[in-house]
Structure formats: C-alpha cells, structure tokens
Image (cartoon, rainbow, N blue to C red):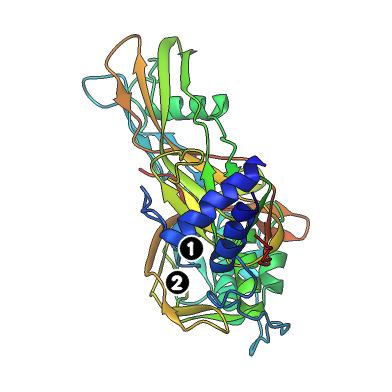
Amino acid sequence: MRFGGTVLAALLTLGACSSDPEPREPKRTATSAAPTSAPPTMPAQAEEDTPEGAAAFVKHYIDVFNYAASTGDVEELSSLSSPNCKGCQRYIKLYRDTYAAGGYFRDSDWRLSDLQLRRAGDSSTLFGTVTSPPGTYRRTSAETPEPGNAEDSDLTFIANRTSTGWRLATLELQADS
Amino acid sequence: MRAFGFLVAVALAVGLGAPAHADAKVEPKPKDARLVLEAGRHSPGKQSPPTQGGNIKTTDPKPADAYCQLDAGNEVQCYPETFEQPADEDEAELTEGDVVRAVRELGLPSLTVQIQPGEETLVNIETIFYTNPQPFERSITLLGFDVDVVASPVRYTWVHDDGTVSTSSKPGRPYPAMDVTHRYRKPADDVNPRVDVTYRVRYRVDGGAWQTIGQTLQASGPSAELDVREAAPVLTRP
C-alpha cells in the first residue's frame, strides 16, 4: 500500500502537480478593457416601435456587438441585451473575459444581411445572416494570435419592446434546415 | 478508496501514454457563432403549401411578415411579405412543422453529465465525462392523426465550462473506458460542465413509412458541479 502511495505520488508528479512546468498557467492581468473609442450612437429609427424600428435596432445591436468585440467594452452591449438572452450573455462574457485576460479580437466584424421580420405583440422576430472575415484573436496576453473562423451563420434575433425601448431577448442560430 | 484507485489508474494512463480517444475534440474558435450559440436554436416554423403526393409539408425556416432592407446608412426600409396559402384551408394537413412543435412541447430528454473521478478532479489529468442516453419514443394524436415519434441522439456537445467545448457521437462510458475526456488546465472552484444533446427525430403518420425531420433538435443538460484541484507530490518512506 505504501508502494502504491509512492507510485501515485511519483505519477502525480508527472501528471498533476503544481510544480509541473507544462502547461504554463498564464497570468491573468487585472487590467480592464480600455476602449479607445465610444460605442456607436443609437439611431433615432432604432427607437421607433415599428417594424423598421425593430430592424434598425438589430442593425444597431450588431454595430455595438462589433464595438464590444474590438474593444472589450461590453457596457453598451449589456444595456441592449436582456439578462435572459443566453446568446447575448455568452458573447458579453466572452468579450469581457478575453480582454480582462489580455486577449483581443481583430478584424472580424459581423456584417448583417437584410432581415426578414415577424411581429407578435411587443416582440419582433428577425431572421438574418451574419458574415465576417476570419480575423485574428488571442485568448490571453500569454498566447500568440491565431486566425479565427470566417463566419456565415443564419441567426434569429428576438427584440422585445420595453418601457425604455428595444431589448434583444434572443440571439440564436436558426435551426438546421 | 475507489477514487484513489481511479486516480492511480488515470495517473498511470497519463504517465505511460494516454490512449487515443474515439471522438475528435473541437478546440473552439472563441467567437464562432456555431459554437457560442450552439445550445440555442430557433425555428418558429411557418408551413409552406402541401407537397404533392402526401400530406406532409416541409417547414419554411424563415417565416416573415416583412422584408427589411438595411442600407449603408442607418435607415431601414421594410416591405410586406406575401405568402402562398394552402388551396383548401379547411383541409386538415399535418406538417413537419406540426411534428416539430409537438416534440418541443413534449420535451426531449435533457441528459445529466456524469464525471469521474467525481465532484473533484485534478488539473492536467484526464477527467472522464459520460452520460446515460434515454430512449424517446412517443405515440401522440396530432390534428386527428396518430403519430409515432422517435428521437435518437446524434451528437453530444460537452461544455467543460473552462472556455472549451468538445463533441462526440457517442455518450461516453465510465472508467476504465476513456471515450470522452478533458484536461482542465487551471484549478477552479464551482466549474459547471454540462452536456447538450442533439437529436435526430423520426416520425410516422397513421402507421405509414418513417420519415426523418430535416432539422435536428437540441436539449441542454443541467450543469454539474465540479472543483478542479491541484495536487502536490509527497514522497513517502517505502
């Protein structure tokens, strides 16, 4: 049994100890995102309670999304996103965490196609395609930049009308067809 | 004690060469929408007119009341969309979209991720993931038709909650099998891994031929609780 303990200790030395040199743990920096520009201003049309307003809001949302991706400043993106929007919150967390760790995304802005829209009460569902070049990214300051993926994804956006304007309640891939 | 034995075995596997795994891992490009948004898919479903030779219609994934053009500036123009209507609206028709909606209402099984060695694991060793698929077979009455529905898992998406995701076509198995494994690189408390299951759904109407729904459906599993620890080596006198 003691022999077994020695074997375990020795193997853990190889496989799972804190002094193991590989892989190196990247140091998380305490620096927060430092935006170099202001987020896009919401156009007046995006505040209208109309089909055009809903579509303009989604277009503006993508502009703010791209701003957050390139700066790590997710404050405006958060304010436009419902807390229950899982897709939105995943990207907000991705951008916040990546930039907090010294990472970044470059040259991978989403471009939005024309939209198809369906209204139901205070909710508007919009369908569109986002495309983007691969760009580059790095997850942390300790990593070397890598190429991203060129995107061509069909997305569903659901914008809900609230007392303060539109909020994105759903950001999802469209189902496989 | 069982956990101790498991750790010894895992350490042996790590030290002597890890086995090849059955399914390829995906190291996600972090911004890729297909990975970030994979868990949630949406298709509200509007039905197109019935196809000839059968009472099953295809699902149009992009129903709309309006088509909105985005110009280079910030002005948006929307135009009403028109759709073909079925020739006889009184005729009862069962569509693929009806079946999809029914299946969604029934709810496909969400699977609980099983983790070995347990609620705690170690950095830099293989942590084993597996789940126990549940059969999904239902017979329902839909718009007057008797419909049999069978859903089968076709893909398992393992969300490790450390920023990485892997996929497999099999549900994994417990130790000593190591079909689906993951190495956590950093110690962390309260990691919440889960498994999302993608189902392929087949159905038949009134005992007719089986048909496969053209889209897959997903069910996200509940999050597990896992602590990722570091272990310091301690030499003992033999």
The residue sitting at 31% across, 19% down in the picture is B55
* Circle 2 residues within 10 Å: few <14, some 14–19, many ≥20: few
- What mark, if any, has residue B71 been given in the picture? 2
Residue closest to the far right: A163
The answer to whether B43 appears left or right of A11 in the picture is left
Check if mark 2's residue and mark 1's residue have beta carbons within 8 Å: yes
Kindly identify which numbered label has been placed on residue B99.
Answer: none
Q: Which residue is mark 1?
A: B77
Q: Which structural element holds mark 1? A: strand
> Looking at this rendering, what residue extends furthest in the front direction?
B238
| Left or right, residue B148 beside residue A38 | left
Residue A108 visible within the image = yes
Q: Amino acid at mark 1?
A: Gln
Whole-percent x, y for residue B185 in the image: 58, 66
Q: In the rendered view, does B49 fall on the left or right side of B99?
A: left
- Inspect this view and state whether residue A116 appears: no
Query: Residue shown at 64%/88% (left/top)?
Result: A37
Badge 1 local density, few (<14 within 10 Å), some, or many (20+)?
A: some
| Horizontal relation, residue B184 to residue A177: left or right | right
Residue B156 at what x, y percent from top left?
46, 43
User: B219 or B3: which is nearer to us?
Assistant: B3
